[in-house]
Amino acid sequence: MHLDVRIPIGLLFVVFGAILALFGVFSGPAIYQSHSLGININFAWGLVQIAFGAVMLWLAYRGRKAKV
Amino acid sequence: MLQHSIQLHSIDYILLVTYFLFVLGIGFVLRRTVSGSKDFFESGRSLPAWICALGFIGANLGAQEVMGMAASGAKYGMMTSHFYWVGAVPAMVFVAIFMMPFYYGSKARSVPEYLKLRFDEKTRGFNALTFACMTIMSSGISMYALAKLLNAILGWNFHGCILVSGVIVLAYIFMGGLTSAIYNEVLQFFLIVFGFLPLVLLGLKDVGGWDGLVAKLVKPAVDAGFAPGTWTHSWAYTGSASTNPMGVEWFGLAMGLGFVLSFGYWCTDFLVVQRAMAAKDMGAARRTPILAAVPKMFFPALVILPGLIAIALHSAGGNFQLPSKNGGLDYDMVVPTMLAHYFPTGMLGLGLTALMASFMSGMAGNVTAFNTVFTYDLYQGYIKKDGSDAHYLAVGRATTVVGILASMAAAYAAASFNNIMDILQLVFAFVNAPLFATFLLGMFWKRTTGHGAFFGLISGTVAAAIHHGLSLPHGATAGIKGGWLGAVHVYPSEMAQNFWTAIFAWSTCFVATILISLATRQKKTDEELGGLVYSLTSKIKERDARWWQRPALLGSIVLALALVLNLLFW
């Protein structure tokens, strides 16, 4: 049985996104003020990655259901 | 200098370690799908087109590409886009529509094996040997570049980096074979997109969008003595070699880069072709390069734009400065400098993970191509012809270990001889440029003979060497850069010299192959050539397929899009 590649991709991005978004919330503005033009990029890009990861996992789930 | 300029924190390490665990996990889960050599070397020919397509560009998306294109963007501006819109995209459409039917449709399991079926043993042997050497050298140079970069910006131990990167790549290929390499390339593809896209977005916002960037790029162009728009146009200043920083005119560009070098790479290099050959059926194999061409054509936004932004910021003289090297700017540091400038702790970990992913995908691509060519073409071809399938699988795994060890040796060789990169580029230009002529004639002219192909290739390679020996790029001294036979012609840049070396090599091979073929007897019968030559292969019917499954239609759409991009950034 082949592994659906969308599962590890989805998982990795959900995990990465969650780590970065949480870090963005709790780390305070000092971390990003001197970089990234004052944008809390950890939080913002963390959310984008969670969304992408979730779509990948949903596609994998749908693909599995279609096969059964 | 950027010495140890990046400070990583525990969050960055957490991201890095998580990524490595995923990479190894994929290999671990896939180890059960490998039950024979076909699974290990060809993914059992079972993958859907979109996975092969992302693997197809992922394997090519090594760090040389990511860092090199950014460097080139800073150095030459928008003209760098020719590597994509004139180079890669048309070649990818060509290989999909015209060549994939012969690669996938014949019994060949590798590009050298196709040469054996179409021509003869000696042509296959020559191609397999040179290819095996080049993959090991490229993989070693990838390793060396990774270790050197991590050592410079993070202060990590050079030997440790070589060892760890080698062991990780070895582990996941050893367990899951080509499937594992391709799956990881897909993962790496997304990681690179997600790691670099915010860099581009932040950079663009910083310089005031595309319009702001265009305005800011006037200064570096004028400072270098060119017209104000040189850095933001791809074709407008190619009327003569002296009006653009690349030092090439439109003909050398279109013919040398667009035709010979790109087609030579994308159509005959087994590293990329292997990804398409892993597809589950002929339709998927043909769609692979076309689907790959779609993201490929937008890659300049991801890899060239950071270079443009970096040089714009640098010449504006703010707090962003590129490090210098040997009196000029160190363009290879564009990406690390941008990462350190725009990414705070956290995102920095993601950016570095993406960079490491790109190094490792470049290595893995070379190693999987090496183990296949070595096992099928050199070991099975010359050492043991009638082993069991389990035997070849074992040899493939052992070859993977040997390939990684040899890459490590090549990495140390690269560390001690500083011109090994130039040597590799030279070998590549000498051997690869004429190869496309051999394939073109082999696939579309059934009269091409084995002797014609072999001696045509040799003459093309010799022609490349002679041209290189007689010419020199501006400002260089005779030696590894050329002119070792006495410089008769001086090119404005190294790039121009490369393109013209390729043009000479290709033309010589093309003419020599035709002449020698006409003078020698065709030893292969028409039956033997069925499925290998255009005129002797039944045409694939596309009428039954849905419109989005028809390669010719998809290819035309992709070409039209590439044309629009060329016109937009003319």
Image (spheres, helix red, strand yellow):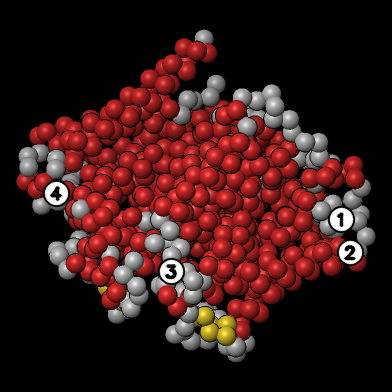
Q: Is residue B392 above or below residue B366?
A: above
Work out which quarter of the rendered image holds the N terminus of chain B and state it. bottom left
Residue B213 horizontal/vertical position (percent): 26, 58
Q: Nearer the viewer, residue B456 or B518?
A: B518
Q: Nearer the viewer, residue B488 or B569?
A: B569
Pointer 2 or 3: first along the chain: 3
Dot 1 amino acid type: Arg
- Identified at 40% across, 72% down, the residue is B245
Classed neighbour count for the residue bearing mark 1: other residues with Cα under 10 Å, few (<14), some (14–19), many (≥20): some
Residue B3 horizontal/vertical position (percent): 22, 66
Give the letter of the chain under mark 1.
B
- Tell if the residue under mark 1 belongs to the same chain as the one under mark 3: yes
Residue B489 horizontal/vertical position (percent): 57, 85
Dot 2 amino acid type: Leu
Pointer 2 or 1: first along the chain: 1
- Tell if the residue under mark 2 belongs to the same chain as the one under mark 1: yes
Give the letter of the chain under mark 4.
A
Residue designated by label 4: A37
The answer to whether marks 2 and 1 mark residues whose Cβ atoms lie closer than 8 Å is: yes
Q: CA distance from mark 2 to mark 3?
A: 43 Å
- Tell if the residue under mark 1 belongs to the same chain as the one under mark 4: no
Q: Is residue B213 visible?
A: yes
Residue designated by label 2: B518
Residue B390 horizontal/vertical position (percent): 68, 35
Residue designated by label 1: B447
Instruction: Name the mark nearer the viewer: 1 or 3.
Output: 3
Q: CA distance from mark 2 to mark 1?
A: 8 Å
- Identified at 45% across, 38% down, the residue is B186
Q: CA distance from mark 1 to mark 3?
A: 42 Å
Residue designated by label 3: B237
